[in-house]
Structure formats: C-alpha cells, structure tokens
Image: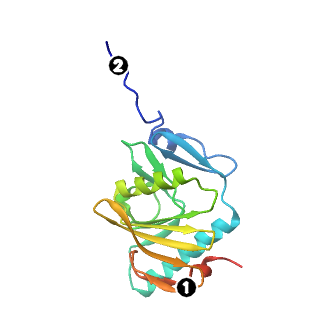
Amino acid sequence: VSAEVVNPMDPYTVEDWLAEDPPPDGSKRELILGKIRVSPFASTGHNAIGDELCALFKSALRLAGVRGRYPVTNVNLVLSAARRTAVVPDLAILNVRPGPLTVTPQQVELVAEIWSPSNRNRDRSEKLDAYAQAGIRYFWVLETAGPVVHAYELRAGRYHLATTLRDGTAATITAAPVPVTFDPADLLVE
C-alpha cells in the first residue's frame, strides 16, 4: 500500500509569477507558498500614506548622513524561490541602488505594510512569517484605522514588537536602519 504525498504548496513558481502580465486594473499580485494572491488596486489614501512614509525615511536617512539606503514603494521582493513566495511590500528600504526587476531579502533592510481593516488576518500572519523566515531585520505595520504604527525587530528568527506609535503621539522608533521621529497622524494627507 502506498500513500499519496500531498504538496502543501500550490503549483505556481516565482518564475511563473514574474512571467504573468500585470493585471490591467492595477491590482497587486503576490505569491504565497505557490498560490497567487490578488489584492485590489490600492486607494489613493493608501498610496499617499506610502508616499509620506517613503519621504519620512528619505529625510531621516539624509539627516543621519546615511548613504546607500534607498526607500522605495512597491518592489518585487522574492522571499524564497524554494517556498514559492514573492511579495510586493508597500515600502522597502534597499541597501542596493533601485533598478532590477526583483530584489532579494539580503538587499532589504526594512519592509513596511499598510493594512486596512479589510486585510485578512491570514494574509497578515503569512506575510509576517515569510518576512521573518527570509531574515528581514525590520518590519513595520501601519494600520490605517487610527493610524497606528507597529515596528518589529527580528531576533532569533522571530519578530518582536519594539515600538507602537499611535495617532497624536510623536516619538522615535529605533527599529529601523536609522532612528525615525514622527507622529503617525503626519502620514495622513489632508
């Protein structure tokens, strides 16, 4: 008697993911354990928050005199070809000059995701685990309801919450390539 081995991953590879044409509606395609996940096109408010966060990091890096770090939005990040996982974080701080179609975890210092109440908990936990397994040192979550920022730092292969900033509270987050001081309310474009 033989038992059928069931592969827990869906059949899509990173190469399949990269070969697909971008959706015409601008939605985001990500690959999680071989399964293509499609998220609707981000709202203008979501994109504006991402732009503000990017500008905040650019300013902090310049003020600290740090060169060779590049905050960018929406990069194709191949977390693991073997685990068939590639994502498009809302923001990443790269340690290589932007340009290639994809980046690897070794080229990323920090990722940030902007989550609204509609993001499913499963999506959140899968991404958190995937970023940790890939060894990305810093992970930020910006919850649009609030807004609230949670900054995590990777220690012993797991993310540990370093700081939570709430709307109306200006403080410094050190779980980043350089310390960043701000109030989450400043990320909202009025």
| 151 displayed left or right of 148 | left
Under circle 2, the secondary element is loop
Q: Position of residue 99 (x, y in %)?
A: 47, 61
| Label 1 to label 2: alpha-carbon separation | 57 Å
Under circle 1, the secondary element is loop
Looking at the picture, which amino acid does disc 2 mark?
Answer: Ala
Q: Position of residue 117 (x, y in %)?
A: 63, 61
Count of numbered circles on the image: 2
Q: Quadrant of residue 7?
A: top left
The residue singled out by tag 1 in the image is 169
Residue shown at the point (64%, 56%) measured from the top left: 118
Q: Quadrant of residue 135?
A: bottom left
Label placed on residue 3: 2
Q: Is residue 166 above or below residue 27?
A: below
The answer to whether any part of residue 71 appears in the image is yes
Quadrant containing the C terminus is: bottom right
Q: Is residue 28 above or below residue 95?
A: above
Colour scheme of the picture: rainbow
